[in-house]
Image (spheres, rainbow, N blue to C red):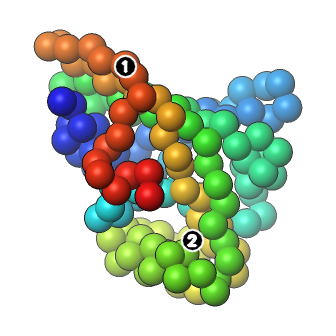
Amino acid sequence: MFEQEALALLRSKVAFMANYDGSRPRVRPMKPFVDEANRIWLFSHLETKKVGELSADNRVDLCIVGEMQEILRVSGKVEEVSDATRDLFAATRSKLFAAMPGVGRYYSGPDDPKFVLFRLRAEEISFASRDCEMTGRVELGPASQA
């Protein structure tokens, strides 16, 4: 019912990602990448504190506020996908670099060994706008959990 609105926000906006550093919450801006199968990807530099935090506790929330004050929250768990020999990893990072040219300011290219890719497995999605408010276990498309 609101999947297209959620996908549009995920594809166009910067999200704020909350995760845990031990028992302390941390919030950071993150630009998600949504591929053609509606899988949600997050990326980071290998040598950041965030990578260690996500390895210790993979629970995250993304929050986006749209231009019309609609609010999207995506709760789930991330899994690190960094094995450069895996086809999905290689294909996704190439697509990400093509779709988000600004990423090149931080990495030497899609094969940069410092580039870490995380897949977000959404468990709950909340969407609120002036017209509706919905929360539940939602798939963003037929291939979102594949």
Residue 51 location in percent, x, y? 74, 54
Q: Residue at x 26, y 24 (%)?
A: 70
Give the residue furthest to the left.
Answer: 131
Quarter assignment of residue 38: bottom left
Which of pointers 2 and 1 lies earlier in the amino acid sequence?
2
Where is 78 relative to 1, above or below?
below
Disc 2 marks a residue whose amino acid type is: Tyr
Task: Say which residue appears at 41% left-offset and 71% top-offset.
Answer: 96
Disc 2 is placed on an element classified as loop
- How far across and how far down the image is residue 110, in percent? 52, 82
Q: Amino acid at mark 1?
A: Thr
12 relative to 6, above or below = below
Quadrant, the N terminus: top left
Badge 2: few (under 14), some or many (20 or more) residues near its Cα, within 10 Å? few
Badge 1 crowding class, 10 Å Cα cut-off, few under 14, some 14 to 19, many 20 or more, is: few
Badge number at residue 135: 1
- Residue at numbered disc 2: 106
